[in-house]
Amino acid sequence: MNLSSLSFFRSLRTNNNNKRQFAVVGLGRFGRGVCWTLHRLGYEVLGVDADEKKVAQILTDQIAAHAVQLDSTEPAALKEAGISDFDTVIVAIGNYLEASVITTLNLKEAGVPHVVAKASSDIHVKLLQKVGADHVVFPEHEMGCALARSLTKPAILDRFDLDTDHSIVEVIVPDEFHGKTISELQLRNRFGLNLLAVSHDSKFEINPNPHQRLYKGSAMVVIGCNKDINRLPI
Ligand code: ATP
């Protein structure tokens, strides 16, 4: 389970308009980060926390349009705040398992279409899924995995996991590929990978011409099976 799960984003896209409203329940470091980014992207965000200091702080820092102090384990309090009118609510309560699970359940029972919940352990992930979270993130675990991958495969600049076995990766062109044309490299035959784009002067060319040569230091984007991506000479 990770942030780049396609099925979740597909479901969000069905309701993709600029009027989308977000609420973030829990204004710890993670919740504030979510609020800050949504706010900067121009979305209207409601910040929610039981702690009135956190609520006041988020307004002072101007990282949410609105903020309200309430106990999200109370369905009546959520109803009064109009939470069911929000398209997407992020439950950013990682350290209080009971409050996190009850809040998620309350939000789904109130009819919120997309509830994203933050977990802080494997069992927390399972509980959030059981009570109906549409998407569960486990940032500490995901960051740990990403760090391990970047340490062992520094040539992989970015990756988008399509599912557990398939990814799209941006990778530095391996030395072995330097000066060869795309057709000479036979990426599909040799590695089972499809080349989607190559970089030129910090811009990507999509569906590059097969006669084009690749040069070390530039980047390419490929799609395929993770085990095939791991066979690239990087
Ligand atoms: P960190 O801040 O350490 O990164 P985190 O982002 O997971 O962790 P938590 O420590 O879990 O944050 O706390 C998130 C916020 O959730 C806290 O500000 C806390 O006041 C708030 N909170 C906890 N229980 C409730 C609740 N029942 N209703 C509303 N807010 C709550």
Image (cartoon, rainbow, N blue to C red):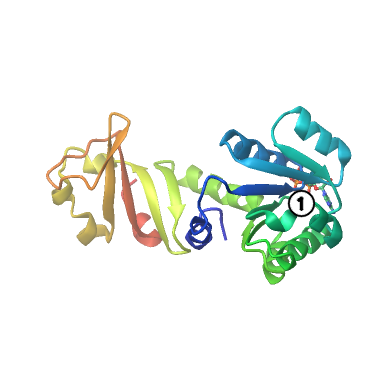
Look at 59% across and 47% down and name the residue there: 143
Q: Is residue 42 above or below residue 12?
A: above
Observer able to see residue 34: no
What is the x, y in percent for residue 5? 51, 58
Q: Is residue 131 above or below residue 38?
A: below
Name the residue beneath numbered marker 1.
Answer: 93
**Residue 119 placement: quadrant:** bottom right
Q: Is residue 210 above or below residue 65?
A: below
Q: Is the CB atom of the residue marked by disc 1 within 8 angstroms of ligand 1's nearest atom?
A: yes
Image quarter of the N terminus: bottom right
Along the viewing direction, whichever of 17 and 139 lies nearer the viewer: 17
What is the x, y in percent for residue 54? 82, 37
**Residue 188 placement: quadrant:** bottom left
Label 1: element kind: loop
Observer able to see residue 169: yes
What is the x, y in percent for residue 222? 32, 51
Q: Residues within 10 Å of mark 1 (few under 14, many from 20)?
A: many
Total numbered labels? 1
Along the viewing direction, whichever of 7 and 66 lies nearer the viewer: 66
Residue at the outermost bottom position: 130
Look at 43% across and 41% down and name the residue there: 154
